[in-house]
Amino acid sequence: MLVECYDERGAEVYEIIIKQIFQDLVLGAAVDDLRAYVNPDDPVFILAIKMKKTSSVVKFEDVANLTYVKDDDVTRILVDNENYLPNILKQLWKRFSREEIYQPNRYQLEIAGDNTDLKTLVIDDPHSNLQRRIYDAIFRILPEGFKIIKDMSTDNIVTVVATDELIADAWIEKANEYISELEN
């Protein structure tokens, strides 16, 4: 972790704030490295966070078996991994009304018609979930009043430039430097 600030005490304070927020959100183990730039004279805050690699997406077929029963014209779903049941229901409720999903027991669901195409539906995306949590941390870290935000994130590096003025080219360059450093 590197926090750059012309004021050494200011850098220490922001490092403490960042560590505390990461601890509160249980993000420490999910982050590889971090760069922050704070300059109160030029009201700017730049934050670049490299995420650790996450597991791949979890598809419906990874956590449940889908079978179409032609005689009944119903798709039966047998949930293999109960941990994903809330995610399965959430995704199904996006596609169907709650009334269309019959749940005779905890591990079994039924939907009228042939819905075997659900096999490829993404149930959980750890990368997206981590990214969302990191953005949450960033918005807690940013100084109050810094409403002008430029998101410069790449696939595994979440980067923002925040200010209460127009964003200067030098700040964009600084953010790009951080991205380059974190990619290596």
Image (cartoon, rainbow, N blue to C red):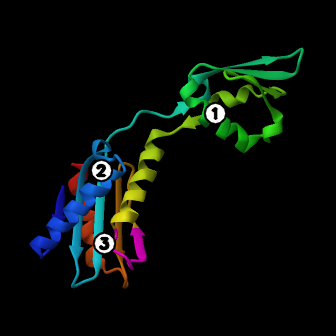
Few, some or many residues within 10 Å of mark 2 (<14, 14–19, 20+): few
Q: How many marks?
A: 3
Q: Nearer the viewer, mark 2 or mark 3?
A: 2
Q: Is residue 94 left or right of residue 138?
A: right
Q: Nearer the viewer, residue 28 or 118?
A: 28
Q: CA distance from mark 2 to mark 3?
A: 28 Å
Q: Amino acid at mark 2?
A: Gln
Instruction: Say which mark, if any, is on residue 23.
Output: 2
Few, some or many residues within 10 Å of mark 3 (<14, 14–19, 20+): some
Residue 39 image-quadrant placement:
bottom left
Residue at the spot of label 1: 88
Magenta stretch encompasses residue 9:
no
Residue at the image point whose x is 29% and y is 41% from the top: 29
Few, some or many residues within 10 Å of mark 1 (<14, 14–19, 20+): many
Residue at the spot of label 3: 172
Report the magenta residues as a range: 142-150
- Which of pointers 1 and 2 lies earlier in the amino acid sequence? 2
Q: Position of residue 7 (x, y in %)?
A: 12, 76
